[in-house]
Image: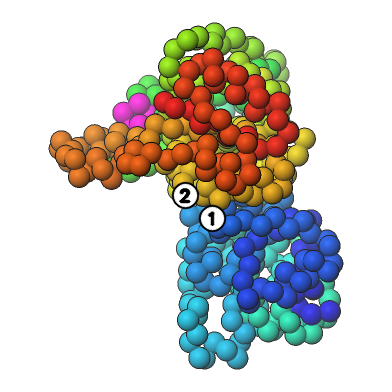
Amino acid sequence: MNGAESLVKTLASAGVDVCFANPGTSEMHFVAALDQLGDMRCVLGLFEGVVTGAADGYARMADRPASTLLHLGPGLANGLANVHNARRANTPMVNVVGDHATYHKEYDAPLTSDIEGAARPFSDWVRTSADSRSVARDGADAVAAAMAPPGRVATLIVPADAFWNEADGPAPLPPVEARAPAAPEAISDVARALRSGEPTVLFMGGHALREPGLTLAGRIAAKTGARLLAQTLNARVERGAGRVAVDFLPYPVDAALATLADARHLVLVGSDAPVAFFAYPDKPSVLSPPQCETHTLATPGEDIVGALEALAEELGASQNAPVQAREKYPLPSGEEITPEAAAAAIGSLLPEGAIVVDEALTAAAAFMSRTRGAAPHDCLQVTGGAIGIGLPLATGAAVACPDRKVICLQADGSAMYTVQALWTQAREGLDVTTLLLNNRSYAILKQELANVGPGDAGRRALDMMELDRPALNWVGLARSMGVEAERAKTMEELERELAAGLRSEGPYLIDLVL
């Protein structure tokens, strides 16, 4: 058994049974091992940002890591934007990055680079295997590191000769770190704040936004009058009818400040303290008001559900939590498509158990408001703010959950970063319906231009934000990659195409002309 075979066996025995890959010469022995051993499903991505984004989507839904396979430093660099998103989502991820053979490094061949230096800012754990007999143990350590709470990015760099030289066989998975319980004094401190009668917000992230955390938070809110509020962007949220409803902190600074203006106590439940995405002239970076006291019930890496259980018991919050009712969203007819009208169609037609991937950007608020009372579903968001993750995220989620419909709400500008994901969806026959929100611009940048306030924008500035010269042919792009696609310019066309997409068992793209 060579090093590559020992690594594949080690990963598979640790539960890492999917590899999203874009390999090169230095990874050929790993590719051969994937083929010969048959222990892992191999999914090819035509760009490394698709590979890393798909691994993120897979792990968010499967609750276990996938592997990526990347080619040297440049291949890793191509995928780092979505590694950043995964790290911000606390996604468990194992990146396997090939490197030149150890004896070849001294010659400074064209693809030589500092792979560890590139990986470290985006990874929680980085290691380069010393030799072929180390690879299996290093791989097991990488999986354990990725699975450590709250979920981490592990990057293992393997020289080519460590892949092809003889190894000792697979290595067992070492003990995986468990979630630490929240401190008893943290429970008592938050209970005092909730009993104070002063306006209190439970600011939620991580497993607080999934069952049973949601129900526990709802019981606490029902008992104390606290307000439930989620982070602006989250790895995975369980939403819809029959579930405890949670609002989201708005993205715009002024709206976020207004949302928290009355809070006197902010309780962090698996979340970080809220700050603005960017600095803006004459606006604060910290979004909670000066008079607000911040309390930590549980950090993202602690036992969030256990902390909520202990808090509910401390408060005597035994009553049932109120849940979201099923809502009907009237469908406008005969009019041009707007984000609000498109959102109403989604809210009305969304199938139960769907996975909604949200990279709608400027249209996101409309979709979130009009799917609050839709059929129960999971929502995956762009946690790190690096655009170009929607299509890959949907791809990975569909691999993880082949029995569930995936709906991707995708802005047109960011879709071009990783449009190659459509090809992977077609090749794998994935059940993904993409609503391509086509406003022919980076509309969010136009909003940010006004928010930052450098003055009136001229033609040259606006040219950096508009995508209409030439306009992108999304139907043609999708069909060229094997994905069925149609265009919708009216609500009647949208309803017809959305119904067709939901009936389809493979990938389907709807070009929504906004």
Contact flag, marks 2 and 1 (Cβ < 8 Å): yes
Q: Mostly what secondary structure, the magenta segment? A: helix
Q: Is residue 283 shown above or below 48? A: above
Task: Please report the bounds of the magenta region as a residue range.
Answer: 252-256
Residue at 47 percent across and 49 percent down: it is 417
Name the residue beneath numbered marker 1. 49
Label 2 sits on a secondary structure element that is: loop
Q: Residue at x 55, y 24 (%)?
A: 246
Q: Is residue 27 visible?
A: yes
**Residue 61 drawn in magenta:** no
Front in this rendered view, residue 514 or 471? 471
Q: If you read the primary sequence from the N terminus, does the residue marked by circle 2 or circle 1 appear first?
A: 1
Where residue 381 appears, x then y in whole percent? 54, 38
- Reply above or below: 216 against 127: above
Q: Which part of the image, by quadrant, shows the N terminus?
A: bottom right
| Distance CA(mark 2)–CA(mark 1) | 8 Å
Graded by Cα atoms within 10 Å as few (under 14), some (14 to 19) or many (20 or more), the crowding at tag 2 reads some
- Place of residue 52 in the rendered image (x, y in percent of width and height, measured from the top left): 58, 55
Q: Which mark is residue 417?
A: 2
